[in-house]
Amino acid sequence: MSNSFLARLPLSRYEVDRDYLARSRENLFEELWADPATRVLPIFQGTALLASDTSLALLPVGAVPATELLVYLGRSTSLRSPEPVGTPIVAALLTDAGHLAESDWASLRTVGNILSDRDTGLLTEALGVLNWHASHAFSPRTGEPTTVTSGGWVRRDPVSQTDVFPRTDAAIIVGVLDAEDRLLLGSNALWESNRYSLLAGFVEPGESLEAAVVREVFEESGLRVTDPVYLGSQPWPFPASLMLGFTARLDPEHTNTAVPDGDEILDLRWFSREELHNSLGEILLPGPTSIARAIIDEWYGEPIADGQK
C-alpha cells in the first residue's frame, strides 16, 4: 500500500485520541460540562456546524442548544488547530438548531476532503456513532428501549442487562483492470444515468474480503477476476460502512464479457486513461471524499480535475 494512496483517503485522517478509558466514568459528562476547556461539535440532521469553509465550529458548552444525545469523541491531538492539544470534544445531536439555524452547516460528503485531519476524523467518528444510535434504540434480544451509557458508546438492555455495541458493515470496492490496464466503471440504478463508479458490495457472513471481491464483481458484471490486491480502507458512515479498497484483474482462464446485472448495475464501460480524460464532460465520477475516487485517481496517476466538490 503506497503512501500516495493513503494520502488520497480523506475520511481515514484523524488527530484525535479517543480516550476510551474515560468512557467508563459514571459522571463523565458532568465532569466534561464542568471543564471550561470542553468543546462541543453540534450535529443537526446529519450536518455539522462550520466555523469557516474548511473548519468545524467547536462551541463552548453553554453555547449549544438543547440536545437529544451526547457522545464523547475524545481529546484533540492536533498541533495545528485553534484548540490546544488535550481539548475534550463531545458530539451533540441537536433536537433543534435553535439560534444556530442561520449558521453554516455542511455534510461530510461535501467537506470531508477539505477539512483538517482532526476535523475530518471528528465528524466521521461522530456521524458513525450517531447513525448507529439511530438504528439501535431497541434491544435486539427483548425489543425493549435501550439506554445510553459509556459516554455514548454503549446501549444497554434494561431487561436482560446486556450491552449493545456499535457495529460497522464491511464492504469491498474494486478497481477491475483488464490486460490492457483499462479500468471498469459501472452506472448504478440509483444514480443519474451518466454517473459511473467502481463495483462494490457488502461482505457476507463467513466470507473473506478476497472472496467478496470475486463474488461481487461476478454478480454485478459477469466477470471473473483473480488476485485481489488490498489498497487501504476508509470509513463511510452513510450509515455505517467501512470501505475496503482493492484492485483485481480479469482472470485469463475465463472468457470475460462485461454484462451488467440489470438490477444494481445498468451499464458497464471500460476506460483507458485517455478515454476517461476525454469523457469527463460526458460522465460524472465519484466525489473526492470517496475511496472510489481515490482508487480511480491512483490508477489514473494523479488527481482527476473534473470540477466536482
Image (spheres, rainbow, N blue to C red):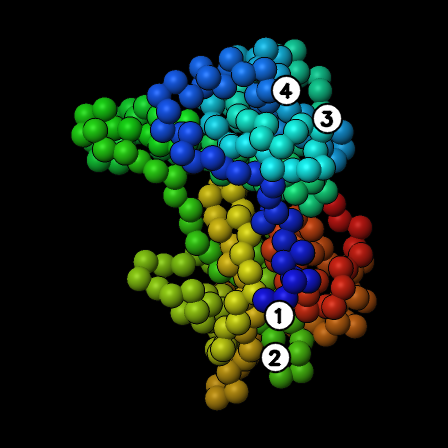
Secondary structure of the residue carrying tag 1 is: strand
The amino acid marked with disc number 3 is: Ala
Cα gap from disc 2 to disc 4, whole angstroms: 51 Å
Q: Secondary structure at mark 2?
A: loop
Q: How far apart are the two marked residues, 1 and 2, measured between alpha carbons? A: 8 Å
Amino acid at dot 1: Leu
Sooner in the amino-acid sequence: mark 1 or mark 3: 3
* Callout in the foreground (2, 3): 3
- Residue 52 visible (yes or no): yes
Residue identified by numbered label 2: 178
| Quadrant position of residue 211 | bottom left
Q: In the rendered view, does 219 fall on the left or right side of 40?
A: left
Question: From the image, which quarter does the N terminus lie in?
Answer: bottom right
Disc sitting over residue 51 in the figure: 3
Residue bearing mark 4? 59
Task: Classify 10 Å Cα crowding around label 1: few (below 14), some (14-19), many (20 and above).
Answer: many
At label 4, the amino acid type is Leu
